[in-house]
Amino acid sequence: MKKKLVLFLLLSVFTTAMLQAQIRKVPAEVTDALKNKYPNAKNVEWKDNLANFQATFSMDNAEWTAEFSSKGEWKESAKKMTFEALPAAVKDGYSKSKFNDWAPGTVHMIEKADKSVVYKIYAEKTSLVQKRFLYFNKEGQLEKEVPGI
């Protein structure tokens, strides 16, 4: 019994050490890039996604996420918003799409490094069966649909 306990403790310590070794510190270039792009960001939390760093923060009474490369290059940002706050062209495009009878859920405005803006709408027909992420451009055209989880 003592051997199993010692083995379990050693395994726990080893696993914890391995997990701690995999967590990178957010480089100063990345935190500086966020401060430059969004000087009014509050309550910033960082996540290491291996290929990039993602900041989650609040600004102007909205929830935001922003992705940066490890060198501090901004990739894209997403602002959470309500369906009612969407531009009229996007709401019109949704109502004219084949998904007009689906219930819209969370909505994000996504700004990309190439200066394009896309609106991502999570929609579901029935909560357990059909779910999609719908991507509309500023003009309200459905650009793509991705199965939801």
Image (cartoon, rainbow, N blue to C red):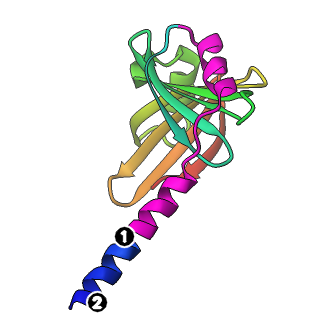
Q: How crowded is mark 2: few (under 14 residues within 10 Å), some or many (20 or more)?
A: few
State the residue position of label 1.
Answer: 12
Taking the image as shown, residue 31 lies to the left or right of residue 80, namely right
Instruction: Identify the secondary structure beneath mark 2.
Output: helix
Quick check: 135 above or below 131? above
Image disc number at residue 3:
2
Magenta highlight range: 12-39
As shown in the figure, which amino acid type bears the numbered disc 2? Lys
Instruction: Identify the secondary structure beneath mark 1.
Output: helix
Quarter of the image with the N terminus is bottom left
For image coordinates 36% across by 70% down, the residue present is 12
Q: Where is residue 113 in the image (x, y as percent from the top left)?
A: 75, 25
The picture quadrant where one finds residue 35 is top right
Which one is in front, 5 or 104? 5
Give the prevailing secondary structure in the magenta stretch.
helix
Evaluate whether residue 14 shows in this view: yes
Instruction: Give the CA distance from mark 1 to mark 2.
Output: 14 Å
